[in-house]
Image (cartoon, rainbow, N blue to C red):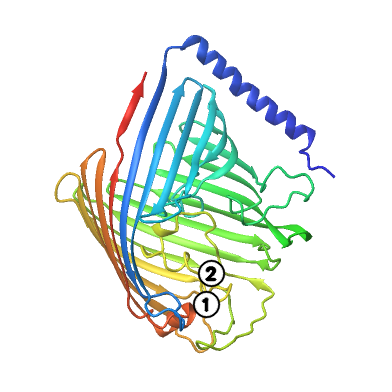
Amino acid sequence: MSLQPPNHTVRLLTLFLSLCLSAVAYGQRVDSVKRQLNIDLEILGQGETRNGGFPTNSEKTADNSNFVVGRTRLIANYAQRGLDAKVIGQNSAVWGMKDNANFKLYEAWARLSTKFGLFAQIGRIALAYDDERIIGPNDWATFAMSHDALRLGFENKQHKAHLILAYNQNGEVVTDGGSYYSDGAQLYKTMQTLWYHFDVPSFPLGISVLAMNIGMQSGTKGKDEHVEWQQMVGGYAKFAPRHFSFEASYYRQMGKEEHGLELQAWMLALKAHFMPSDFYGLYAGYDYLSGDENFAVPAQGALGLTRHEKLKGFSPVYGSHVKFYGAMDYFYFSSQYGSFTPGLQNAYAGGYVRPFKGFQVGAAYHYMAMATKLQDMNMTLGHEIELSASYKFSKDVQLMAGYSYMTGTKTMERLKRASDSGKLRWGWLALVVSPRIFTSK
């Protein structure tokens, strides 16, 4: 049985693409000389030092590391009326690696657009929506995140509507029923997302709604292969009067996770930002991500058995995690005990100053706690203090640095299976050089 879209869907997509192609042809006729090609280079060198927080065993004598990561990107942008294209080749590796096989095509897409606001974009795209909590490139990670997708949409001054469609395969196979396993380049087999944003006229308020359907490969390879579906719905709002901004978001997850367990999870986030001048600012916020209930966490070296009929732990799926839950990215980068999570409460406050042009220093505090009460465990996970600084020598050269210190509780030590979670330290220093090496008009 072949999988084919309904005839009306095919006709709709054909009509949409025909409109975009017609606009491109028109643009070429009336404005054939307005074409531009830019080639940029981005070189990132980042040194990191860390200590504590990861599970230890008898073979590992020390839980610390020091390394330097390098990332190089070559970026080509082409634009003319009705047509834009972008290609980014990326290589990322730790200094001194023997086998440097980490080159990939990070982005490669073409976008057709009309003067009426319609557009169609296809290829490998670094998607970013709203505050990037649910969908973002997660650019802090040196490999970053992009999606092979078709994006259709409409945009004008007040309204933006995007439809994202993705379907992934491990190769050009014709006999496995269309299965897609985690050894591929993408995180899911298929995804459909609808996003709509509205800016209120003459009022500093923007509202977005998002609906996502994700299909994950399930079953044993070659046997009982099927797709489990999960959905996410929610929204984001930002109100930004003079010197202030207020953000709020709420999302709910439903359906089933990849192993077939029912999924019922939700999250809420609030943030306030005060900017009295260009020289300093203050902010505070609170995040709540629901967690699984009533699972036992045995002591180090012991076994535990927990039976769950549904999962309540929220997953921020494809977001830029490091932006929200502490600079250490400790709670959604490395998992909690087993495949379950007690969720997270993150109350934070911080500020920054800009004493002169190009220079900024900042500090932040995070209080971390579980979202659910577990057996014989205090809900507090720990406290994190973050310091950061950046200086922009020119538009092409920037130096950044940061240091984080976290004091964890006995609860976090049990969840992470790490006896040294009481004192975690992480520092980093990064230099970014991003010149434009060629331009043509």
Q: Residues within 10 Å of mark 2 (few under 14, many from 20)?
A: many
Q: Position of residue 376 (x, y in %)?
A: 50, 89
Q: Position of residue 105 (x, y in %)?
A: 50, 41
Report whether 319 appears left or right of 327.
right
Figure check: 310 above or below 73: below
Dot 2 amino acid type = Ser
Q: Nearer the viewer, residue 255 or 121?
A: 121
Figure check: 13 above or below 329: above
| Outermost residue toward the right in this view | 1
Figure check: 54 above or below 147: below
> Dividing the image into 4 quarters, which one contains the N terminus?
top right
Q: Position of residue 2 (x, y in %)?
A: 82, 42
Which residue matches tag 2?
290
What numbered label is drawn on residue 372?
Answer: 1
In the figure, residue 153 lies in which quadrant?
top right
Look at 52% across and 10% down and name the residue there: 29
